[in-house]
């Protein structure tokens, strides 16, 4: 008979298949989708918590020997004692017992009768029958009464190490299961109130392991329908999107996480947009065991994106028309100014030339601001130094030194980031009367980049306003350059701040950019 059921030889219960607990379905299937989201860890450590053991034996000498030996063997264990089953039952009902260790031969009630009494109120409390009786009848009775373990007491030899190991094994397993059950309950409570569809399928999508009630709201089908036919959700996926969904399912089964947007033809007659995220859960060998994830309705978001795209298209058409209509008279005025300069000399011509240049700059900045928006194109990895070089090629840098101190690869919209850096370079040149040295590089914490100069700097009283559209501190400035910088970096999910450089000039720090590590 094994150490837990039917053997006269003691074995470690951790190695016995009879003490393996069936996984709780909810925790086993839902954890991949929810544990990270809610911060619950079903495998929370229980290895350092104290353990209260009750040892019941009518022999005072044996009681004393075991208490001394076990507590010496492991200081996590504290042993209480009782000399009869009646006293032991009272102690258990006191509520401060993690494991019961009991002799078999005792007056009034033997160990198995004591076990049955304990099991009436405490069906999962670890109970180890520790007895010198190793016959099959006692072992059979222990199994029938649901003993957690059965250990034969040796006449010679120190068994304290074995007892400590078994107590720890059973108590830690029970505590882990209790925590998993509590986590399972919390997860199911969350799943019942969640608006997202939470689900888990087998690796080949042929078996539904879990789905919450939100499925009925989003897909318009009863969860029982999906349970009986796990592929039935595809019936309401739009014909134009179904092949893409199937392809994403195949890739998930092969071990690659997926994110996909598709349309659902709801039985109510409405067409909904949804977004699904799924992640394959693998075993230690990397074999996919199941697919878990969530599906969220995003119809309002898609409608907003469509409206925004339409408005942006209208705005782009409008700004292009305005640019054309304004640049034509500017070109005419500039041409006639050039003729006037050739035919006569007048002190009034130079202010006209300055005004035309200012109007042209203002028009360029207004167009850039109108087209900035909140979106960026697909991000690619580029070298920051290359962005700085490309930016400097588009501005007049005579007598200006641009020094790239260090560089790194950044995942961004290169065109938009170049526009932002170009505006910062131009800002440093235009706001300083003398030639300046401009330094660019990576922030010390690696979370972004900086552009600084050794010029006059920006007074602290003005730093809070410099990113406002139209605000400028020089007569010829348009006030839109830094506002465009702020919007571009914001569209990347970052932010821009200004402070004084070590040289006394202005230092702009662009944070939140995505470095390629």
Image (cartoon, grey):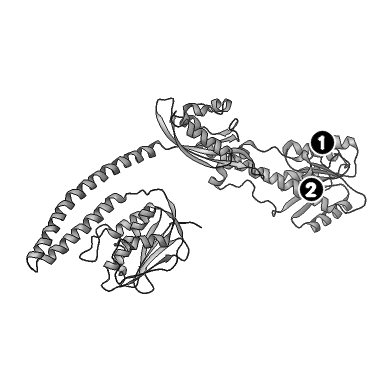
State the count of labels. 2
In the image, residue 309 lies at what x, y percent?
Answer: 32, 41
Residue 194 visible? The answer is: no
Which residue is denoted by mark 1 in the rendering?
143
In the picture, measured across the screen, residue 313 lies left or right of residue 357, that is right
In the image, residue 62 lies at what x, y percent?
Answer: 88, 51
Q: Toward the viewer: 213 or 228?
A: 228
In the image, residue 162 lies at what x, y percent?
Answer: 82, 50
Local SS, label 1: helix
Q: Toward the viewer: 381 or 306?
A: 381
Q: Toward the viewer: 365 or 125?
A: 365
In the picture, measured across the screen, residue 131 lies left or right of residue 337, that is right
Q: Residues within 10 Å of mark 1 (few under 14, many from 20)?
A: some
Q: In percent of the image, x 45 and y 66: which residue is there?
A: 406
Q: Which mark is residue 166?
A: 2
In the picture, measured across the screen, residue 120 lies left or right of residue 216, that is right
1 or 2: tag closer to the N-terminus: 1
* Quarter assignment of residue 115: top right
- Quadrant housing the N terminus: top right
Q: CA distance from mark 1 to mark 2?
A: 17 Å
Q: In percent of the image, x 55 and y 46: which residue is there?
A: 36
């Amino acid at each position: 008979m094994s150490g837990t059921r039917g053997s006269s030889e003691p074995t470690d219960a951790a190695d016995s298949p009879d003490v393996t607990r069936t996984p709780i379905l909810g925790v086993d299937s839902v954890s991949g989708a929810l544990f990270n989201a809610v911060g619950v860890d079903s495998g929370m450590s229980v290895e350092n918590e104290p353990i209260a053991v009750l040892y019941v034996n009518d022999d005072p000498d044996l009681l004393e020997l075991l208490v001394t030996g076990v507590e010496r063997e492991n200081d996590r264990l504290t042993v209480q004692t009782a000399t009869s089953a009646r006293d032991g039952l009272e102690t258990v009902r006191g509520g401060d017992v993690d494991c019961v260790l009991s002799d078999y031969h005792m007056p009034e009630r033997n160990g198995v009768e004591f076990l049955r009494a304990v099991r009436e109120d405490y069906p999962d409390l670890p109970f180890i029958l520790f007895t010198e009786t190793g016959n099959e009848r006692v072992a059979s009775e222990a199994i029938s009464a649901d003993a957690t373990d059965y250990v034969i007491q040796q006449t010679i030899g120190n068994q304290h190490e074995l007892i400590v190991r078994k107590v720890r094994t059973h108590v830690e397993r029970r505590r882990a299961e209790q925590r998993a059950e509590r986590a399972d309950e919390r997860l199911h409570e969350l799943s019942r109130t969640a608006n997202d569809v939470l689900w888990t399928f087998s690796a080949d999508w042929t078996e539904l392991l879990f789905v919450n009630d939100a499925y009925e709201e989003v897909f318009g089908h009863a969860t029982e329908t999906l349970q009986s036919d796990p592929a039935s959700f595809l019936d309401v996926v739009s014909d134009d999107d179904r092949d893409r969904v199937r392809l994403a399912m195949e890739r998930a089964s092969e071990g690659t996480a997926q994110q996909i947007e598709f349309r659902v033809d709801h039985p109510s007659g409405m067409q909904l947009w949804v977004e699904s995220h799924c992640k394959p859960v693998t075993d230690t060998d990397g074999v996919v065991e199941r697919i878990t994830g969530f599906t969220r309705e995003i119809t309002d978001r898609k409608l907003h994106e469509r409206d925004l795209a339409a408005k942006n298209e209208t705005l782009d058409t409008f700004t292009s028309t305005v640019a054309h209509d304004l640049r034509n008279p500017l070109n005419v005025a500039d041409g006639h100014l050039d003729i006037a300069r050739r035919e006569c000399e007048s002190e009034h011509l130079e202010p006209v030339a300055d005004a035309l240049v200012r109007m042209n700059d203002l028009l360029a900045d207004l167009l850039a601001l109108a087209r900035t928006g909140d979106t960026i194109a697909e991000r690619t990895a580029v070298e920051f130094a290359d962005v700085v070089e490309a930016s400097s090629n588009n501005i007049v840098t005579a007598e200006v030194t641009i020094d790239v101190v260090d560089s790194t690869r950044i995942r961004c919209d290169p065109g938009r980031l170049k526009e932002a850096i170009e505006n910062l370079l131009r800002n440093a040149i235009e706001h300083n009367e003398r030639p300046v040295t401009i330094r660019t590089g990576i922030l010390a914490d690696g979370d972004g980049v900086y552009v600084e100069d050794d010029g006059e700097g920006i007074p602290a009283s003005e730093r809070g306003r410099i990113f406002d559209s139209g605000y400028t501190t020089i007569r010829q400035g348009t006030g839109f350059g830094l506002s465009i910088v702020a919007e571009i970096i914001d569209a990347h999910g970052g932010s821009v701040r200004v402070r004084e450089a070590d040289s006394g000039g202005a230092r702009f720090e662009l944070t939140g950019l995505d470095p390629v590590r």
